[in-house]
Image (cartoon, rainbow, N blue to C red):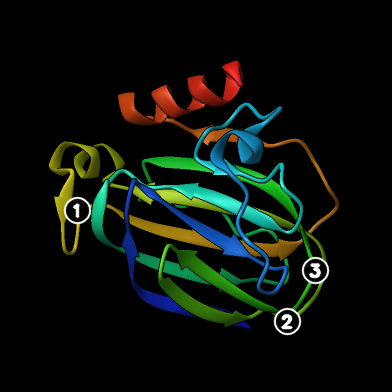
Amino acid sequence: MGELFSGEVLVHYGFAHLLTNGAEEPGMPDAARRGQRNGLAGAAVAHQVYLVTGLHTGSVVFTVAWLPAEPPLDDEWDEVVEVSLDVAETMAAIRSFDDWHPLTLPATGPHRVRYSAAGFEAGRQVDTARPGPDRYLLQLWPAPPAPDRIVRQTSANAAYWHDVAWKN
């Protein structure tokens, strides 16, 4: 299937959502991260993933890809986390406040989501830009549920968010 979306996503307050449950409202950050170790991709609310960005306000480049199996880990990404997601509907979206980018996923059911960031710390340092220095890759593939995990962490900003999740 490959790439489902590539473009700029407007962010405010440093977050976006992957929604796979139609028009339902996104969960709140604390609920999305409850019980997780990673703080960058919160998947504790069913059928959605809360995504933290380094940039506070502006736009970031997002790519969303669907793969038939787990992809190899790419060294170009500074921060990498994984979560499980039960995809409720094939009509999905990347959403942040009033910004909405529709996606069509090839399958429903249990998936693994890998959220990778490059320039996450630089985005935090800039705070506001269009586009920001940070960029993101969201990869989904069919997989049974598994605990979330921090695959790679290199920045103080990512460590902060992982700590927020751990204390939640």
Residue placed most toward the observer, 35 or 72: 35
Q: Which residue is mark 1?
A: 133
Whole-angstrom CA distance, mark 1 to mark 2, is 31 Å
| Residue 145 placement, left or right of 94 | right
Q: Which residue is rendered at x = 58% and y = 16% of the image?
A: 167
Can you tell which mark lies on residue 88?
Answer: 3
Q: Which residue is mark 2?
A: 106
The kind of secondary structure element at disc 1 is loop
Measured as percent of width and height from the top left, residue 4 is found at 53, 80
Measured as percent of width and height from the top left, residue 116 is found at 46, 50
| Residue 48 placement, left or right of 9 | right
Which quadrant is the N terminus positioned in?
Answer: bottom right
The kind of secondary structure element at disc 2 is loop
Q: Earlier in the sequence, mark 1 or mark 3?
A: 3
Measured as percent of width and height from the top left, residue 117 is found at 39, 49
Q: Quadrant of residue 150?
A: top right
Q: Nearer the viewer, mark 1 or mark 3?
A: 3
Say if 136 sits above or below 161 in the image: below
Whole-angstrom CA distance, mark 2 to mark 3, is 12 Å
Amino acid type for the residue under numbered disc 1: Pro
